[in-house]
Image (cartoon, grey):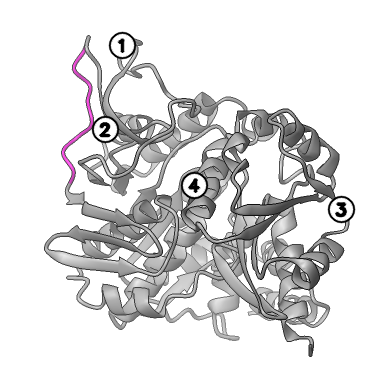
Amino acid sequence: MLAVSAAKLAGYVCKKLGRQGVTWAGKIALTICPDILERLSSQVRKGIFATCGTNGKTTTNNMLCAALEAEGQKVVCNHTGSNMLNGVVAAFVLAAKWNGKLDADYACIEADEASTRHIFPRIKPDYMLLTNLFRDQLDRYGEIDITMNILEEMMRKVPDMKIIVNGDDALSAYLAIDSGNEYITYGISRPAVRSAASEIREGRFCKCCGERLKYNFYHYSQLGDYYCPKCGFARPDLKYDAQDVKVGDQLEFQVENKHIVANYKGFYNVYNILAAYAGARTAGFQADHFQDMLNNFNPENGRMEQFRIKGTGIILNLAKNPAGFNQNISAVMQDTSPKDIIIVINDNAQDGTDISWLWDVDFDLLSDESIKSITVSGIRCQDMRLRLKYVDISSILEGDVEKAIRDRTNDGVGNLYVLVNYTALFSTRNILKRLEGEKS
């Protein structure tokens, strides 16, 4: 009771001070009661989902939470995307009552891959939803094999955990198959988009025998229909298969004779939606209210979040590694109308101080006449400007993010995309919300 009360008070104070405060609430709770996560998670009545993967965790996890709530379930969720131990603890303590009791049917917990060693043994998830595995923050995670080793270790430590896996990703599928855990697959069995030949592709070699994988087609990066010509490892049969995929101003596809429509851009969001659908179905629901959930779902937290300032429509999105940034660029280019772009790059510890990944992003795709201006901002704005210069794209240098946004809302074309990496997300979102609330 003391730990829950102290955490709630810390969260309240931080919110009043305009700070996110979630991790502080978790840290305080753990200090007072070291086994609080075990105590609270054991009170979840029906099941705990842990969402892992390089890209799409927050959107997928929040969407799954909304899908379960649409089925009348009470759900604990770390909506803010605070996905390390303190953030996960905070999700439970802030959802608990003052007496330390938790009223929840399910928990949907986004978990940082490296932090699963601290989270999984405590909460023992019933389901693990694995979105994809890409190279990300090399100075923090190291090469992708390190992340895979951590996840494999956690899968084996929770042998009763069902794995809901993106079958189109050879790395994720290999982990699920090799773990020995029961697994359920989702994916897109037929070509839906044209993948750029220059894209960086992880996991080119078969994890079973080392032979170079062959593909019948790519969706993007290494996602697609793969097979090993030597040992026979191949994309598994897909239980939840998105068919007749249409990408434009909105996304459409069919799954299990359901017609799914979502008012989002970006092909990658088909995977996020499909993963959430697979999660709800694996939990035993018919997902009859899934479309209703999508109609009302607000991504928030800077994932394709929309703002309107002085008549300018603004979309804020997170772009923190080559695969994610390339998909962001594809989503921006689906909009053929005139637009301005602001790119904010930081190199704080949570971002990874090594920003060499910028050279693996296909920024040359931004040399399109529909893009009227590109402004670079953030701590490493000079590096971003240099990167664009190497593909002959001129940019405006403005280190102050708020001034960059004000300039484009005052003098832009009325259509603005703001692409930010991790630590720039919360501060940029706060700026946009504040400017949106100002009177013209």
Quadrant housing residue 182: top left
Q: Which mark is residue 209?
A: 1
Residue 217 in sight:
yes
Residue 113 in sight:
no
Q: Which mark is residue 330?
A: 4
Marks 2,1: beta carbons within 8 A: no
Check disc 3 and report the residue beneath it. Answer: 398
Q: Secondary structure at mark 2?
A: helix
Q: What residue is at 28 percent from the left and 44 percent from the top? A: 192
- For residue 223, side relative to residue 323 (left or right): left
Q: Which mark is residue 148?
A: none
Quadrant that contains the C terminus: bottom right
Q: Is 234 contained in the magenta span?
A: yes
Q: CA distance from mark 3 to mark 1?
A: 49 Å
Point out the tag, 3 or 2, that comes first from the N-terminus.
Answer: 2
Residue type at numbered disc 3: Glu
Check disc 2 and report the residue beneath it. Answer: 177
Mark 3 or 2: in front is: 3
Q: Is 343 contained in the magenta span?
A: no
- For residue 279, side relative to residue 351 (left or right): left
Q: Main secondary structure of the magenta part?
A: loop
Quadrant housing residue 401: bottom right
Point out the tag, 3 or 4, that comes first from the N-terminus.
Answer: 4
Point out the tag, 4 or 2, that comes first from the N-terminus.
Answer: 2
Q: CA distance from mark 4 to mark 1?
A: 34 Å
